[in-house]
Structure formats: structure tokens, C-alpha cells
Amino acid sequence: MSGSVHALVCGGGIAGNAVALQLLRSGIDVTVVERASAPRPGGQGVSLRGAGRAVAERMGLMPGIRRYQLDERGMVVVDERGRTLASISAEQFGGDRFLADIELNRGDLNRVLLEEIAALPVTSGVLDYRYGEWVEELDQDSEAVKVRFASGAVHSFDVVIGADGLHSEVRERVFGPREHFTEYLGAYVGFFTMPTPPATMLETAWGGVYPVPANAVGMRPHRDPSSSTAIINMRMPVDENLRGDTARQQRLISDRLAGHGWVVPAMLDAMADAPDFYFDEMIRVRMPSWSRGRIVLLGDAAYCGSPMTGLGATLALVGAYLLAAEISTTPDNLARAFDRYEELLRPLASGVQKGTEVMVRLLLPRTRPVLTLLLTLLGVVVSRPMGPVRTLLTRLLGTRGEYRLPDYPSTAP
């Protein structure tokens, strides 16, 4: 099939690299453009559960994932002095809910995908991978999509896949302003890599979270115990002045967390020098359609449920697998391929997105009395094997990502 279809993938993250891999395996030529100058290391921890794990197995990714998998056995809730308030192991929720038994850093999962792409045989489609490049203009007709890039280059493609994340430029250029499709969930999320503070539970492969009214500070271990991921959640009104202003974001974090205990002082000291600092709104993306003509959206660009769901990587992998398979099945009927992709994935995506605003209010209570009640409830839940309270909490922690994958001819090695 090489040469019959040429696809442009916008975005070199998990969704973009996963769909590129599967298209190339099917013999389709692929150009990938990524605004960053190189693959982004580190990043937020991601979970593989349910359909995400099943797709990773079908795609032949599990050997690579196992190489980078984190030894994260659970999470400890602590007070300002680091004393344990509650301890939750991954096994308590079957390794498939709030804590999954397969966890790794976003950058490492992306590395696995890039390694698979690099190892493709010469019989695969032709790959053109461009870092430091992005789309400036899109003009489509019934025959092709004419694309002008930031470098000034102009090329035509049979299909354009917007896998460029939460603030997708492809979505805005083709479908309209972000405000039409995004919903602020009432909180911000931040994370960055930092040296592991001494004398923390992270040395024994347990993550930690320190909740205070309207905020929660967490740390998750890396494969290298000398470093960890700092996680910050803040419940607050949206502030558009924060967008893209790292200095303002870090001042806000310092002001909100000043005077708090546990590892917060070390976290604030390390924040300015973090190589991968990220801070953004918790947003849910809902769209009436994920495609228009020859252009289709994938991953967070189309159906982000927010980091609260813990299923962003699962949706990215499952979406990439389905989209690539449908394009490969009907390369001469893209409208049919896009309709099938959306028909198959929308039930899972809608289920993941459901109730995320409730999770924000539940996990980030504004007042001390409500927080105390929540911690008391959590202590009861984790100390008993079953019961109605535990069942309720399990439901609130969201879907497992359960989903029955359709059968396609295998393209994995």
C-alpha cells in the first residue's frame, strides 16, 4: 500500500506516535511534525489499564513497557509532618482503578513507541519525522489537504491527523475556537521532575499525597530512586493570565503552598530549575464530531477527560489503534474510516469523561472540615475489605477503561 496514502500526523506525543506506528506497519506513508525540538523526557506518570493494556499487547509494546515500568506499589496519604493517614496499595483496587499495576512516565511510554518506529522493517510505509515544525495553514478539498508549515514548506496530504494535545492548533484551525469545545473543571494541575527528598516513602516505591484545603501535593517515584515527579493540584477559578506564563504560574504555586509541610519546601526550591515544568487547567474536551473532510482529531485534542481520570494514555492508545486500523481497512473511503473510528471509540471516551467535575470537588475539598471528613472516610475504606462505602468510592474513582476491542488483522511484529 506504500505510496497510495500519505498521512500527516500533527503531534509527536503518545497518540501521534502510536497512530504513526500502526499506519506505517500497514504500509501507509507518514509525515510526523512535532513543535518541540526533540522527544520530551519525563513528564506525568501514566497508567495502562483495561483496553489500554490490551492494545499495548496487540501492538507488541509490552516488552518495551516492562523495561520502563515503575515499581509503584501504592500511595500513602500523609499529614504536614509526613505521618501516614492512610495507605492504599494498587492491589486493593485490582491494579486497575485509581492506582494501576502498570505505571510509567509519559516520556518513557513515548520512548517505547519511538523505539518501535525505529525498528520497523523496510517493507513498512515511508516515515518523514520533523522536529521543530508545525502547521500554519490547512486548506482541504475533495482530493487532498494542502498544508503550509511554519518553516514555509508546502505539501499536500491525503489525510491529516490532529494529535496535538489539549490546546490543539489543528482543532482550532479546522473546527473553531477552543471555548466551543472545552470545559474548565475548576482546578489546575502541575508536575515536574525533582530530586527525591531524603527520608520519604518514595524510597520504598510508594507514592505520596499531602492534601490541604483546595490543594493537594503529591510525589511519585521514578525508576531511578534519586528523582521523582512532583504533582500539584489546585482548586481555583480559571485565570487566563496564567496561560503560557511560567513565571506567573510558579509565583502562584509558591504563594498558595508557602508555609505548608511535608516535602513542600523542597518541592518549591526545586521547581524553578525543573527541566519539564508543566502547569495547566484541568479541562474536558467534548466535540460533536471528531472529523471534518480529510482531517480528523485524536487523543486529548478530541476527547480529553482531564488528568483526574487516569485514562488519558489508554484513550490515546486505543484511539490510535482504532483510527489506524480503520484508515488501513478503507483507505479509499476516509469518511467511512472516520465514522467507524468515532462510532467505536465514543462510548469509551464518554464513559471516561463522565463525572470528572465531581472527582475534582471530591478530591480537592475547599474547607478543612470537609477534608477531615474525607480523610476519615478514606481511612475506613482502606481498612476494610469490602462494604458500601468502598463500593461508592470505587465507582467515584471512575471507569477501569473496560472495552471490547474489535478484531483487525494483526500488524504487530
Image (cartoon, grey):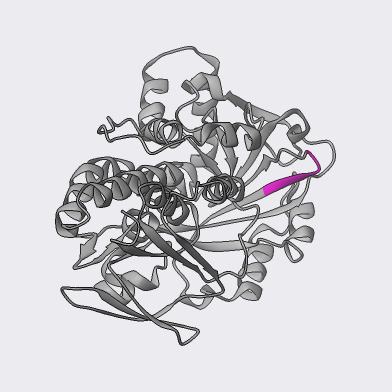
Q: Is residue 123 above or below residue 381?
A: below
Nearest to the observer: residue 184 or residue 142: 142
Q: Residue at x 46, y 75 (%)?
A: 134
Does 228 appear in magenta?
yes
Q: Residue at x 29, y 50 (%)?
A: 323
Magenta residues, dominant SS class? strand
Position in image of residue 222 (x %, y %): 70, 41
For residue 352, say whether it is visible.
Answer: yes
Would residue 265 appear left or right of 79 to someone viewing this image? right
Nearest to the observer: residue 173 or residue 231: 173
Q: Is residue 108 above or below residue 153?
A: above
Position in image of residue 298 (x %, y %): 34, 56
Would residue 5 appear left or right of 208 to someone viewing this image? left
Q: Residue pushed farthest front?
A: 123
Q: Residue at x 67, y 70 (%)?
A: 251
Does 174 appear in magenta?
no
Q: Residue at x 53, y 52 (%)?
A: 214
Position in image of residue 64 (x %, y %): 59, 36
Q: Residue pushed farthest right?
A: 198
Q: Residue pushed farthest top?
A: 385
Q: Is residue 214 above or below residue 225?
A: below
Would residue 371 appear left or right of 312 to someone viewing this image? right
For residue 178, say whether it is visible.
Answer: no
The segment highlighted magenta reads: 225-229
Q: Is residue 398 above or below residue 27?
A: above
Looking at the rendering, which quadrant does residue 161 occupy?
Answer: bottom left
Q: How many marks?
A: 0
Position in image of residue 369 (x %, y %): 52, 41
Nearest to the observer: residue 397 or residue 400: 400
